[in-house]
DNA sequence: GTGTAGGGCGCG
DNA sequence: AAAGCGCGCCCTACAC
């Protein structure tokens, strides 16, 4: 971002002065494929190459099932092709035939680097590539930069969005389950070649828009998953065994198969003379209304069984996915990923930890998402059939888990972004203030001397949960119908529609500052019809090199709706959703920077869940480490001086809440 | 056989 | 005119 006079739009869409977009479009259409001999004879052009492996996979043997690590360690592992592209040609051949020395020490890029890098390392480990085969100077990931810029994450989608070229996915699909020479036909070579060229093209075009601190964050993300977490494997196995039995039992108690067929359930309802519920979702208001009437009938019992099967089965699958990610190897990783000039040292040789994956910028707001077949960001908070899955994640011997999360980060950020100085003043005077309580006092008639949190715990009142639903849901544009179900699922509250209408009306009239944020954002977006709406996040508003934007592409109207393209998908936006995205993205940046500061201070998280970081701390220093981490997370940001942050930390032997 | 869409459940 | 949002994975049903 060198030129201050450039508009945000230009910064995002204008390529740097490298290969032109039309050049890459041509190369993608008809890549020049060469043999290893020709590749060597011509020499490598430039210092960057795109690298793409093709590997065997089937439904049962896949990355999704086993995770990248387990996939590469499996005996079925077979990398049968590699494509390496420079800016003029692409060599496609069997990995053992490629002259790796020709690209040693250069910059390599792959789409999903963790995958290709693991394959490369495994090939060396297996001796398919000679021991000591030199790798790159740095290995970059185009999937990460695509996700950062809110393009589709998948290669074909990204190439389509950035270059307007459609890559054919068919060849790879047809290659499923096959490997070896039978798959190395011209079409397969062309497919692999295009992937490598596409990857290099994407990197060439996009890398200038990926700030340094975000690259460090990406590296930290990968390192976290590779280091993994310590797991009580005995607990996992035991729980899983129980759950398998319970699921089988529950399934056999239903008179039809498959047990979770809502269609079969429907016909059995009919046969019992009971009307079918509008849906069978446990917390859905429509279902609950049905349940009121028919809980005691046979279908009432069946549906309850189905719901129990779903929850139990889900948890059993989670435990199974965990077991598949157990690291049984010794010392797999040393010091890796010197990409982006950052050296990340991994906890090498931690046999028996669980290796997992996290998707950097998995959400369009930049939040992380779970992925790779196991999502650690949506583990049940409480027990199912007596099984507390969070107890599976433990601190390794001699350590404690330090769990630190931000208090009400999203509502604080929303009020800060909106410029609600009254609420902020209260918070700045008392950073520990419970925003939900403040809302309850201001608009819901709560007037006890007691803290609302304690009051609710003592009396069992759901007032705070309702306040939370109001502050969050209503703050992001929730309407009367939706608020009925939000109140139900968040607070267990049966809310008549009339009452809900009144609450929505009152919220909107008593929070003009938040509503004006919706309106400002919506108006700004509407003003970009015919182009892209690019909303710089607060860090970027303060310092352009921060480089974080929310990008809504190809804004247009459909009737009165504002439509746009986000991550390659067409969608409708409005004030509430823009305010929510703005808030979530800002809260994400706050956590992201805290994460980096923690790493800087020597505290590397083992897990991150949106507003929470989890650390493994040596027992002797755990107390003071935790205090240090809390202080680091609460450090005011230069671009958000008036935003009061509060972090709450606790030490535990196993992960909870 | 494959891919996809929708319902469902889990989290922040 | 009004619209909480952001995710992932499993299961079933269905089209090809």
Image (spheres, coloured by chain):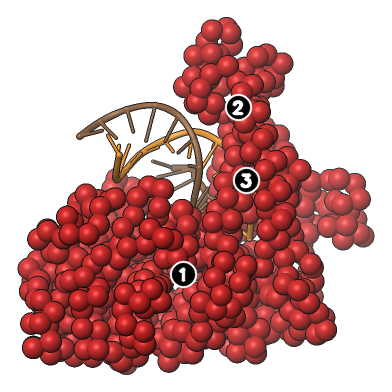
Chain colours: A red, B orange, C brown
Q: Position of residue A389 (x, y in %)?
A: 69, 52
Can see residue A215?
A: yes
Give the foreground label among 3 and 1: 3
Tell me where residue A118 sits by quadrant.
bottom left
- The circle on residue A431 is none
Query: Which of the two residues, A350 or A84, is positioned nearer the viewer here?
Result: A350
- The residue shown at (66%, 83%) is A603
From the viewer's perspective, is A37 left or right of A486? Answer: left
Q: Earlier in the sequence, mark 3 or mark 1?
A: 3
Residue A62 vs A299, above or below: the answer is below
Residue at the disc numbered 3? A315
* Res. A473 visible in picture: no
Q: Which residue is mark 2?
A: A251
| SS type, badge 3 | helix
Mark positioned earlier in the residue sequence (1 or 2): 2
Tag 1, which chain?
A: A
Mark 1 sits on what residue? Answer: A360
């Amino acid at each position: 971002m060198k030129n201050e006079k450039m508009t945000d739009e230009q910064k995002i869409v204008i390529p740097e002065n490298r290969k032109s977009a039309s050049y890459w479009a041509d190369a993608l259409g008809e890549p020049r494929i060469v043999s290893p001999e020709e590749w060597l004879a011509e020499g490598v052009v430039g210092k960057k190459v795109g690298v793409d492996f093709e590997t065997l996979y089937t439904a049962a043997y896949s990355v999704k099932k086993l995770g990248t690590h387990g996939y590469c360690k499996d005996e079925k592992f077979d990398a049968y092709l590699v494509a390496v592209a420079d800016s003029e040609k692409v060599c496609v051949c069997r990995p053992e035939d490629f002259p790796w020395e020709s690209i040693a020490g250069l910059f390599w890029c792959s789409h999903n680097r963790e995958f290709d890098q693991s394959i490369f390392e495994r090939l060396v480990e297996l001796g398919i590539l000679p021991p000591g085969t030199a790798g790159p100077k740095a290995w970059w990931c185009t999937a990460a930069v695509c996700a950062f810029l809110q393009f589709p994450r998948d290669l074909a989608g990204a190439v389509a969005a950035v270059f307007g070229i459609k890559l054919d996915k068919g060849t790879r699909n047809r290659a499923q389950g096959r490997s070896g020479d039978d798959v190395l036909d011209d079409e397969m070579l062309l497919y692999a070649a295009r992937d490598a060229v596409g990857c290099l093209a994407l990197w060439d075009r996009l890398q200038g828009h990926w700030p340094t601190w975000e690259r460090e964050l990406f590296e930290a993300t990968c390192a976290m998953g590779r280091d993994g977490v310590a797991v009580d494997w005995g607990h996992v196995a035991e729980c899983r065994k129980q759950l398998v039995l319970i699921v089988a039992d529950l399934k056999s108690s239903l008179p039809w198969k498959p047990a979770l067929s809502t269609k079969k359930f429907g016909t059995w309802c009919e046969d019992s003379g009971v009307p079918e519920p509008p849906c069978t979702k446990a917390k859905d208001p429509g279902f609950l209304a049905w349940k009121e009437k028919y809980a005691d009938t046979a279908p009432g019992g069946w549906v309850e069984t189905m719901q129990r099967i779903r929850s139990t089965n889900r948890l059993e699958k989670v435990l199974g996915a965990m077991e598949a990610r157990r690291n049984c190897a010794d010392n797999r990783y040393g010091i890796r990923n010197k990409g982006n000039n950052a050296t990340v040292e991994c906890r090498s040789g931690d046999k028996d930890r669980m290796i997992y994956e996290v998707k950097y910028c998995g959400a369009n707001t930049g939040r992380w998402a779970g992925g790779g077949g196991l999502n650690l960001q949506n583990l049940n908070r409480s027990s199912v059939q007596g099984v507390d899955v969070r107890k599976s994640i433990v601190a390794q011997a001699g350590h404690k888990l330090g769990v630190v999360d931000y208090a009400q980060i999203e509502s604080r950020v929303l009020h800060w972004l909106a410029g609600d100085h009254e609420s902020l003043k209260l918070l700045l005077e008392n950073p520990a203030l419970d925003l939900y309580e403040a809302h309850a006092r201001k608009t819901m008639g709560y007037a006890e001397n007691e803290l609302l949190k304690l009051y609710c715990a003592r009396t069992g009142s759901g007032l705070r949960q309702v306040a939370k639903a109001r502050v969050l849901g209503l703050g992001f544009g929730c309407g009367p119908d939706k608020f009925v179900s939000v109140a139900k699922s968040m607070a267990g509250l049966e809310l008549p529609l009339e009452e809900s209408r009144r609450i929505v009306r009152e919220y909107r009239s008593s929070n003009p500052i938040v509503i004006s944020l919706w309106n400002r954002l919506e108006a700004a977006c509407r003003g970009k019809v015919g182009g892209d709406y690019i909303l710089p996040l607060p860090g970027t508003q303060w310092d352009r090199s921060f480089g974080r934007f929310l990008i809504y592409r190809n804004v247009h109207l459909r009737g009165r709706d504002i439509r746009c393209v986000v991550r390659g998908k067409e969608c409708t936006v409005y004030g509430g959703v823009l305010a929510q995205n703005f808030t979530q993205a800002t809260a994400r940046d706050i956590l992201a920077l805290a994460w980096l500061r923690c790493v800087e201070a020597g505290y590397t998280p083992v897990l991150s869940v949106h507003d929470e970081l989890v650390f493994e701390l040596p027992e002797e220093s755990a107390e003071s480490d935790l205090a240090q981490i809390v202080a680091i997370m609460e450090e005011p940001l230069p671009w958000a001086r008036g935003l009061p942050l509060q972090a709450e930390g606790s030490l535990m032997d196993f992960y909870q809440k």
